Amino acid sequence: MRASLTRGRVFTYENGLLLILGLAFGIAFFDRNAGSILVPFIEHDIPLNNTQTGLIGSALSITWALGAYLIARWSDASGVRKPFLLAFLLIFSVCSFLSGLSRSFPMLLLSRMVMGAVEGPFLPVCLALMAVESSEHRRGINAGVMQNFFASVLGQSLAPLLLVALAQTFSWRAAFYIAGVPGVLCALAVLLWVREPNKAAQASLDAPGVGGSGSQMGLGAMLRQRNILLCCLISIFMVTWLIMGWTFLPKFFTDDRHLSPAVMSYLMTSLGVASALSSFTVPALSDRLGRKPVIIAFCFLGVLSPLAALYIQGPPVLIGALMFAGWFGSGTFPLFMGVIPGETISRRYAATAMGLVVCVGEVVGGFGITSVSGALADAWSVSAPVLIEAGCAVAGGLLCLLLVETAPARVSAAAAHRVAADALRREAS
């Protein structure tokens, strides 16, 4: 009865925390994309060559990745979450203001790199906090909404519209200043309404049989956990799949498929909508059906987007529909970046494990493989990265086949089945 009452209430701490953390991460993603979106305006005041333009994004990715692991590990070691969230929000807001004050490329680059260093660990610390405060039946969907929904709406859909409008109406500097304000407001919300999770509650949520709490867990011990290693490998391929899509598909459509920029924009918009919808549908399915079957199915489904772009010769509506369906593969990100690592080992090390998965995916996939793919596009054609994108979805799906199920309902059901089977064997003997 208590569980049913909890499910029926809307104004709960769990829902309030989800709203605050989701908005905060969406704003962080908004700020991350601001540097690239405003480049056409920045270069009128600060001359930028192609290498420098690329560094604005790639340097932030590197510090994002390193911060995701190192600072998240610091949060785990200290045993606290709230002070880190407050520091992250204030620092990346200040970095947005500093980006607007920049008078040279080195100052602009430094402000973006510091921003990446504190935005990277923001996601794993939020996911670790959300895992503790989530109802068991909502752990997957909460992670999906917090990580993907708000980032899709604010960072992918609204950021280009709002930032360009602000830059055209005022200036690119004003756009950076205004972009920093919501982070300060979110810091105030965290200060007033977010509570530090109880350490005893964190320990009580450790999943039995899939990783003990232990007194210490170094990097080697963490990677010896089968699911953690697999999630790192899955992250490499699926992060590459995501970044390759957003980076190379627009150019592929206009240069190789000879579609108009307007049609290309509609096709890419369909991906943003799919990303937002998948943020809660895919994790919700995993809460009911189990993490493993859902992540396998949707990783393999991700191959549909690049293959539709490459080979479907029908009307753009058909291409868009197939790409929309395939892009539901982005709904797997909260599972392999947050939910599965968090359910595999002690909550004491949850942020470190999640940060490690993010770090490996960003560095090896987002930076390394994507950079090589760009060189292949110059040497061959822009269809090469699209083919690699399809291969990454297949590789991610194959790795998912090796995961160990962690969904509480499925794990409990399996344990009950084993107990019943043992009882029957004892009776038979």
Image: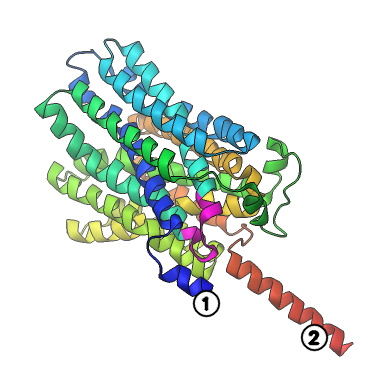
Q: Amino acid at mark 2?
A: Leu
Tag 1 or tag 2, which sits nearer the N-term?
A: 1
Q: Which residue is mark 1?
A: 1
Q: Which residue is mark 2?
A: 424
Q: Is residue 139 left or right of residue 78?
A: left
Which SS class for mark 2?
A: helix
Residue 267, image x, y percentages? 22, 51
Q: Residue furthest bottom?
A: 428
Determine the residue positioned at 23% across, 29% down. Answer: 178
Colouring used for the render? rainbow
Q: Amino acid at mark 1?
A: Met
Determine the residue positioned at 38% across, 50% down. Answer: 148
Residue 339 in the magenta stretch? The answer is no
Residue 193, image x, y percentages? 42, 45
Q: Which mark is nearer the camera, 2 or 1?
A: 1
Decide whether the magenta segment is chiefly helix, strand or loop: helix
Residue 386, image x, y percentages? 35, 44
Where is 58 relative to 101, above or below? below
Determine the residue positioned at 58% across, 59% down. Answer: 401
Looking at this view, is 9 or 367 the one in front? 9
Q: Count residues near mark 2 (Cα–Cα under 10 Å), then give few for <14, some for 14-19, many for 20+.
A: few
Where is 205 relative to 137, above or below? above
Q: Which residues are magenta?
A: 130-140
- Res 351 seen here: yes
Where is 410 relative to 369, above or below? below
Q: Is residue 212 left or right of residue 88?
A: right
**Residue 86 falls in image quadrant:** top left
